[in-house]
Image (tube, rainbow, N blue to C red):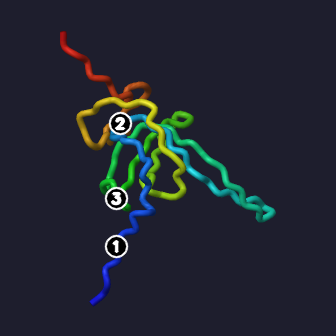
Amino acid sequence: MPRILSINSEKLKKDLPDFSPGDVVRVHQRIKETSDAGKTRERVQIFEGLVIARKHGHGVNGTFMVRKIASGVGVERIFPLHSPNIEKIEVVKSQPVRQAKLYYVRERAGSAPRVRKNKTAK
């Protein structure tokens, strides 16, 4: 019978902020670049945008999708939650939403995709 290996919990990140869909986050990701001379250098690239989905839980397979508008074009990236290439995740703005997946933001244009804040009744 094959032996089942347990997930190494040492590799899971413990300093992750609590964020959910509807939050604006800043993801600091390590990028390796190679030049024509064969030299490699590493830099940190920041991707800031709206979290539109979180999938596969908080464990090893957990991912989150971030969407931003770059030069008038919507760009979406899926980041693994516990990737060693992600240096840190900052929550810029947090706001409540009523859906777990915000895919409807893709069809909106201009300032319409802005998630509205909840208004309190007087």
Element marked by disc 1:
loop
**Which amino acid type corresponds to the residue marked 1 in the rendered image?**
Ser
Spot the residue most to the left.
122
Closer to the chain start, of discs 1 and 2, is 1
Which residue is identified by label 1? 6
Residue under the image location 36 percent in, 41 percent down: 18
With respect to residue 80, does 70 lie above or below? above
Closer to the chain start, of discs 3 and 2, is 3
Quarter assignment of residue 116: top left
Quarter assignment of residue 8: bottom left
Q: Residues within 10 Å of mark 3 (few under 14, many from 20)?
A: few
Residue under the image location 55 percent in, 45 percent down: 28
With respect to residue 54, does 37 lie above or below? below
Percent from the top left, x then y, of residue 30?
59, 52
Q: Which quadrant of the figure contains the C terminus?
A: top left
Which residue is identified by label 3? 59
Closer to the chain start, of discs 1 and 3, is 1
Q: Residues within 10 Å of mark 1 (few under 14, many from 20)?
A: few
Quarter assignment of residue 41: bottom right
Percent from the top left, x then y, of residue 40?
72, 60
**Which amino acid type corresponds to the residue marked 3 in the rendered image?**
Gly
Which residue is identified by label 2? 105
Element marked by disc 3:
loop
